[in-house]
């Protein structure tokens, strides 16, 4: 009986793999006498992923170096500098202009950047702009020719359980492809950067993968690999990627202005809890509205529960904080709020930070 059960399960698995419904199709899956493979998909995507080599100097922050008596007695410089040579990864997002997305921490405090493509060519690159709050940086390759850019996907369409590939340059070994699942979405509170909304994956991510591509099985970029949790420094199956929707918003501002200009609408948020909010856990409650702020002028009130932003569901206060914090100054954000049990639509214009109070306390003010 066990043999028949095993045969039935094997047949079911084959049917799932070889079927091609629109919602679950694995593109470029080669069949027909040979083993199933994602090699055609990998060949299509990997030319857009590059290796990054950086050189620079970092200051060694020792309190003794700031002591003038110590410096005079031991005849040491005001602050010692240490040369660094490191490797990382990046993703070509504009083949004509040579724009490359990577992590801020890959190119922070570097003097020179060299980019190597999959076909072995090397290009010098310039840092166009960096955003430490999201750990995103944009590079521009000099004299770009014969490049291939990746296609952007929609990270908000991801679901836990989706298959993904991670592509990068782990440990400086050269381009490497690993596979896995989306393990979780909306991870926050990791202390990695100011705006956190990580995609968690079990696709192997190691040092050197930072800035590389997380792609879906359509070959679309859905995340920029950024961080891992690892007691020993290597992959243990918990890696994190910055959602491409967030990275793209940051990139567009950097390309246009060289920096990210963040605004505020003047609200403090708190997370919902089933115990305190009648069993509700999805959404974000407005704890305060600053007088004279864009939020007050738009009609938002203390106690409103924000359910959607631009028709996208809001699952947490952190998610809404990211959405507002990454909006351009002057952008109109359409919020669906619940007030006294009834839904309402409120459109608020994002104002400059000076028009709203800055963050304070444990509340998330935006």
Image (cartoon, rainbow, N blue to C red):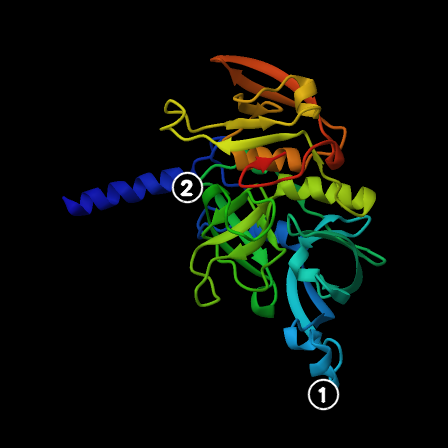
**Above or below 189: residue 342:** above
**Count of numbered badges drawn on the protein:** 2
What residue is shown with label 2?
17
Q: Is residue 132 above or below residue 356?
A: below
Secondary structure type for disc 1:
helix
The answer to which image quadrant residue 19 occupies is top left
Residue 300 higher or lower than 23, as above or below: above
Q: Residues within 10 Å of mark 2 (few under 14, many from 20)?
A: some
What residue is drawn where x is 39% and y is 38%? 16
**x and y percent of residue 333 in the render?**
67, 25
In this view, 191 is above or below 266 = below
Residue 73: which disc? 1
Looking at the rendered image, the quarter that the C terminus falls into is top right
Q: Where is residue 118 in the image (x, y as percent from the top left)?
A: 68, 61
Pick whichever, 352 or 290, lies toward us.
290
Question: Is residue 154 at all visible to an observer of this figure?
Answer: no
For label 2, the SS is helix
């Amino acid at each position: 009986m066990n043999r028949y059960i095993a045969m039935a399960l094997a047949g079911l698995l084959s049917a799932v793999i070889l079927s091609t419904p629109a919602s679950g199709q694995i593109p470029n899956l080669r069949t027909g006498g040979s083993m199933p493979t994602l090699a055609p998909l990998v060949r299509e995507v990997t030319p857009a992923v590059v290796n990054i080599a950086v050189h620079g100097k970092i200051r060694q922050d020792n309190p003794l170096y700031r002591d003038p008596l110590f410096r005079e007695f031991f005849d040491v410089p005001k602050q010692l500098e240490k040369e660094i040579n490191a490797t990382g990864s990046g993703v070509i997002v504009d083949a004509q202009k040579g724009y490359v997305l990577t992590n801020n921490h890959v190119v922070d405090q570097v003097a020179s950047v060299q980019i190597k493509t999959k076909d072995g060519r090397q290009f010098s690159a310039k840092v166009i702009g960096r955003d430490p709050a999201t750990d995103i940086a944009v590079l521009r390759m000099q004299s770009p020719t014969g490049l291939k850019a990746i296609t952007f996907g929609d990270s908000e369409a991801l679901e836990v359980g989706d298959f993904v590939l991670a592509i990068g340059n782990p440990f400086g070994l050269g381009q490497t492809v690993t596979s896995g699942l989306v393990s979780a979405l909306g991870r926050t509170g990791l202390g990695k950067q100011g705006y956190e909304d990580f995609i968690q994956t079990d696709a192997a991510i190691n040092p050197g993968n930072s800035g590389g591509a997380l792609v879906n099985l359509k070959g679309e970029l859905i995340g920029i690999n950024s961080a891992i949790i690892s007691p020993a420094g290597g992959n243990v199956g918990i890696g994190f990627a910055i959602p491409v929707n967030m990275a793209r918003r940051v990139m567009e501002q950097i390309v246009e202005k060289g920096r990210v200009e963040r605004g505020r609408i003047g609200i403090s948020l708190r997370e919902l809890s089933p115990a305190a909010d009648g069993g509700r856990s999805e959404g974000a409650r407005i704890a305060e509205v600053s007088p004279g702020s864009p939020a007050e002028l738009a009609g938002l009130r203390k106690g409103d529960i924000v359910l959607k932003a631009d028709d996208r569901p809001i699952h947490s206060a952190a998610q809404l904080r990211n959405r507002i914090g990454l909006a351009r100054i002057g952008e109109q954000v359409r919020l669906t709020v619940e007030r006294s049990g009834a839904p309402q639509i409120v459109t608020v214009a994002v104002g400059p930070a000076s028009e709203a109070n800055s963050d304070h306390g444990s509340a998330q003010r935006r």
